[in-house]
Image (tube, grey):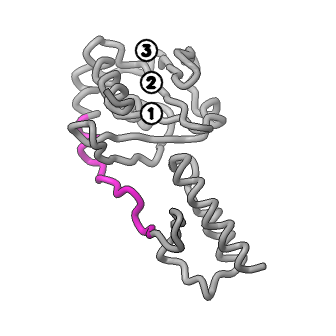
Amino acid sequence: MSVTKNLIEQELHLLQSGRFQEVHLHREGSFLRAYDWSAWLCCRFLHDFKVNKRKFKDVDNPVAYIGFPDTSLGKWMPEGAVQRVESEKHLVVELPELMFTDSAEAMSAAYAEWKEGIPLTESNPGLRKRGGKGTVVDDDIDESTVTLTAIMQRVLAFPIESKSPIESMTFLADIKRQLASLI
């Protein structure tokens, strides 16, 4: 069974077991990710994260997920929340019960509505391969007019807290290539 399928089954188990206030965060490099129910809890009670939803080949239904740098977790932790480390790559945040004024049924309905409203995310929208060896660049950039200011604007606009480590590395490689072309 794949890792993603295990994570999604774990999220379903939270609802069925009545432990709906637990947020399960999974370390991927220097980022933390939350899937489905945990992602919804994060968006509802911690911060308005950018949410992605995509299909995984080994999971029947599309999966909603968020991601953010692990160093940011402290600034979104509500008072009374308890953190526990399940493993090196798995952190559980138990939200205070005072935060939950709705019934489990109402929360489950709100979660279903939230997930349904998230559009499916394409794997790499707007990106294409060029130059072989997995080089990926943004189609919107005209390389003949790349300036240092344009590169800085791209860096400032890049939402790193909602990107996967691979997407961030790809972005950085593209920026590095563009900077090299200016020198």
Residue at figure coordinates x 64%, y 70% from the top left: 153
Quadrant location of the C terminus?
A: bottom right
Left or right: residue 3 compared with residue 117: right
Q: Looking at the image, is mark 3 or mark 1 nearer the viewer?
A: 1
Q: Residues in magenta? A: 112-128
* Mark identifier at residue 97: 3
Q: Position of residue 165 (x, y in %)?
A: 56, 46
The image shows residue 14, relative to residue 155, as above or below, that is above
Q: Label 3 to label 1, Cα distance in Å?
A: 20 Å
Q: Label 2 to label 1, Cα distance in Å?
A: 7 Å
Q: Earlier in the sequence, mark 2 or mark 1?
A: 2
Q: Position of residue 86 (x, y in %)?
A: 52, 15
Q: How crowded is the residue under tag 2: few (<14 C-alpha within 10 Å), some, or many (20+)?
A: many
Instruction: Quickly name the residue at label 2.
Output: 23
Quadrant of the rendered structure where residue 99 is?
top left
- Marks 2 and 1 close (CB-CB < 8 Å): yes
Q: Which residue type does callout 1 highlight?
A: Ala
Residue at figure coordinates x 29%, y 53% from the top left: 119
- Marks 2 and 3 close (CB-CB < 8 Å): no
Q: Label 2 to label 3, Cα distance in Å?
A: 13 Å
Q: Looking at the image, is mark 2 or mark 3 nearer the viewer?
A: 2
Question: Mark 2: which secondary structure?
Answer: strand
Q: Which residue type does callout 3 highlight?
A: Glu
Q: How crowded is the residue under tag 3: few (<14 C-alpha within 10 Å), some, or many (20+)?
A: few
Instruction: Quickly name the residue at label 1.
Output: 34
Q: Which residue type does callout 2 highlight?
A: Val
- Marks 3 and 1 close (CB-CB < 8 Å): no
